[in-house]
Amino acid sequence: DVKVTQSSRYLVKRTGEKVFLECVQDMDHENMFWYRQDPGLGLRLIYFSYDVKMKEKGDIPEGYSVSREKKERFSLILESASTNQTSMYLCASSLSAGMDYGYTFGSGTRLTVV
Amino acid sequence: LAKTTQPISMDSYEGQEVNITCSHNNIATNDYITWYQQFPSQGPRFIIQGYKTKVTNEVASLFIPADRKSSTLSLPRVSLSDTAVYYCLVVRTGANNLFFGTGTRLTVIP
């Protein structure tokens, strides 16, 4: 089975800190994604990447950046954490943009900014 | 992308068949219908995908009528472990973005 591993399940950071959320997948998938999930709002796409060093903005990229230096690793960066970035962050990967394989999600990182 | 509408919540007793219907009136020719399941404190998990008619796998069945404006996820003989949120998505071939709505929260009652 494809595994998508997020480095932390829970994080607590202070306002203004620079925060790194790491995601690694082990099946050579082309595409990787970062979503955030908030009650009543569902999942919202922050950024995605379809190749090493390539990135595309999703629906809510403000306040975030990403890095994909290696195919298996996709990092989400909060340049200066704010309390409205308290959320569950979900990383996902897919083999291609095709529909035959679905998307595999990690278990999520629950980030609290205080 | 076509917007989807599904019930916010459903309750069912153990052992019953559960059908969750999703409407997607503006579905396009090159769109697929995909369902995901999400347990608390976990990421969503792909369940099933279809284009038209019926698709069945070891977890669920997906029924899509000829006009494709709706779809029904069918879970046979649910158990307590099927309590989760179920998301219906319309996905365009080649698209890189999945749009998750708020899903249907299914609660299975003993």
Image (cartoon, coloured by chain):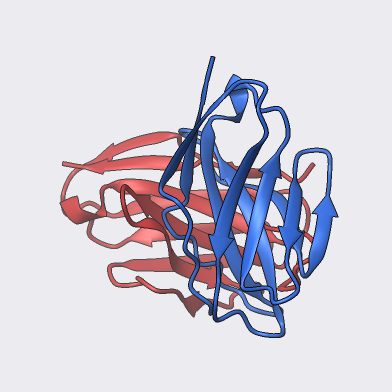
Chain colours: A red, B blue
Say which of B106 and B96 sits in front.
B106
The relative height of residue B47 versus residue A32 in the rendered view (above or below) is: above
The relative height of residue B85 versus residue A100 in the rendered view (above or below) is: above
> How many marks are shown on the rendered structure?
0
Residue lying furthest bottom: B29
Q: Can residue A56 be seen in the rendering of this structure? A: yes
Is B33 placed left or right of A114 in the picture? Answer: right
Q: Can residue A105 be seen in the rendering of this structure? A: no
Is B6 placed left or right of B92 in the picture? Answer: left
Residue lying furthest top: B110
Q: Residue at x 61, y 50 (%)?
A: B36
Q: Residue at x 43, y 42 (%)?
A: B9
Image quarter (top left, top right, bottom left or bottom right) of the C terminus of chain B: top right
Location of residue A51 (image quadrant): bottom right
Say which of A55 and B75 sits in front.
B75
Q: Position of residue B73 (x, y in %)?
A: 66, 50
Q: Residue at x 53, y 77 (%)?
A: B2
Q: Position of residue A79 (x, y in %)?
A: 28, 62
Q: Position of residue B51 (x, y in %)?
A: 77, 70
Say which of A25 and B76 sits in front.
B76
Q: Residue at x 55, y 81 (%)?
A: B26
Is A77 placed left or right of B49 in the picture? Answer: left
Q: Position of residue A1 (x, y in %)?
A: 79, 41
